[in-house]
Amino acid sequence: MVRAGSASVAAGPTLAVVAREAGVSVPTASKVVNGREDVAPETRRRVTEALDRLGYVRRPRFDTAKASGLIDLVVHSLDSSWSGAVLHGVEEAAYEAGLEVVVSAGLNRTRGGRPERGWLDKLTTRGSAGVLFNLAELSPSQYAWLDHHRIPYVMIDPVHEPPAGVVSVGAANWQGGVTATEHLLGLGHRRIAVIAGHRRKMCSSARVAGYRSALASAGVRQHPEYVRHAGFEESTARLRTHELLDLPEPPTALFVCSDRMALGVYTALAERGRRVPDDVSVVGFDDLPEARWVTPALTTVRQPLGEMAATALRLLVRMMRGERPEGTRTELSTRLVPRSSTAPPAGPAASLPAVPRPAVRMQDGDPVPS
C-alpha cells in the first residue's frame, strides 16, 4: 500500500544546525523551510542545499480532514501531446470528483530531473490534498518527505520501479511490445528491428522484452544489431534508423517504442528514398494525434494515457479519504491500432541493398550514436 501512512522518520538535524551549515540566521532558514518569498535567490539556494545535504525534515502539518479540494499534478513537460492527454484525463476525473488541479512542469526546472525541495515545501503551504506525479523520478529523500508529511500521492507511468508500497498506474508495456512484433511477424516480416527509448526506463525495457519474447515464440532469430536506443528523442531515432539501413541486411520492419520517435524514423526513411510501407513497415507506440496526421497514417500500439491519468486520480481520491488501494500497481491494457504504415514485405524490398546515406550533419546537442 502507499507509504504515505508510514509511522515515522528518523529524527534529523535541527533548524539551527541547518542555518549554521548554510551560514544564515535561524529565522532566514525558517523562511526558506516555510516557502516564504522574501529570501534572496542565492540565500535560498544555500539553505535548500543544506536541507537536502543534512536530511532535514519539517514536522508534519498536513491534515487530510482539513485539506482543501486542491491537488497537484507534476508533469515532465507541457510541450507534448503526451502531456495534453494526461492533463485531459486528470481534468475530467477531477471535475467529477469536485477537485481543482494545480499543474507544475517542475521537472524541467530542476537539477537531475527531480523536483526541487522548495516546490515540495510549497505543496504543504498551499494545502494540497494530494499529488499525482507523471513521468517523475523522485529521490529517496523526496519519497521520505512526502511520507513524513502524510501526503497521499500516486505515480503515473513512473520512470523507474518505485519503492515498495508506492501506488502507481501504467500501461501493459510488455504486452504492447508483443502485440506490435506479432503484427509484423503475421505480415511475413522476419528482419524486424526495434528502436527503444532509454535503456533503464521501465516502460522502454518492458517493450523491448515483449519484442524479444514475440520473436522467440515465433522461432525467429534475434539480431543484437537490430536493437537500438534513442532515448525517446525524434532526432536520435532518425540517426538510429540510418544506422539500421547501413547494415548488410537492413530490417524490413521497425517497431518504434514511441510515436514521437516514429516521426524521426519517417524522416530518415524519406532521406534514404525508402517508402513506408512498400520498403519498410513501421509500428509506433502511444497513439498520439501525430500518429493519425502523418502520411501514411501510423500503425501503433494505443496506450490509454487519459484513462491512466483518470485512474490515478480516482486512486488518489480514495487515499485522500483514508482508504487503502487493493494493490500498488495498476496496469491498463494496450491494443494495436492498424493503419497504413505496415504491409507484407515486398519481394524486392526484402533484399534491397543498403542505399548510400546522405551526410548527416550533427547539430549542437545531438546525442552521439551508440
Image (cartoon, grey):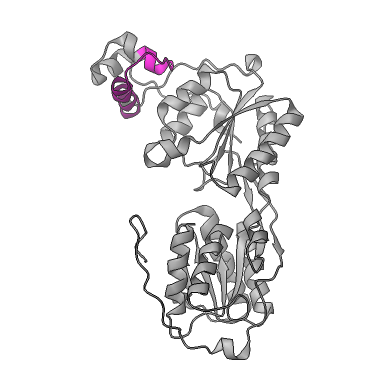
- Number of marks in the image? 0
Residue at 66% over, 29% down = 319
Say which quarter of the image contains residue 370: bottom left
Magenta portion: prevailing SS class:
helix
Q: Nearer the viewer, residue 56 or 341?
A: 341
Q: Is residue 58 magenta?
A: no
Task: Tell me where residue 248 appears, x and y as whole percent.
Answer: 43, 85
**Residue 62 in the figure: left or right of residue 233:** right
Q: Which residues are magenta?
A: 30-53
Residue at 48% over, 33% down = 143
Asked whether residue 230 appears in the rendered view, the answer is: no
Q: Is residue 328 above or below residue 153?
A: below
Task: Tell me where residue 253 appears, x and y as whole percent.
Answer: 58, 76
Task: Tell me where residue 214 appears, x and y as whole percent.
Answer: 61, 72
Residue at 35% over, 28% down = 52
Residue closest to the far right: 96
Q: Is residue 232 above or below residue 318?
A: below
Say which quarter of the image contains residue 367: bottom left
Q: Is residue 244 above or below residue 309?
A: below
Q: Nearer the viewer, residue 217 or 183?
A: 183
**Residue 42 in the figure: left or right of residue 107:** left
Q: Is residue 46 magenta?
A: yes
Query: In what quadrant of the picture does the N terminus appear?
Result: top right
Asked whether residue 336 appears in the rendered view, the answer is: yes
Residue closest to the far top: 27
Task: Tell me where residue 58 appears, x and y as whole percent.
Answer: 43, 18
**Residue 137 in the figure: left or right of residue 345:** left
Residue at 50% over, 28% down = 146
Say which quarter of the image contains residue 10: top left
Q: Nearer the viewer, residue 210 or 326?
A: 210
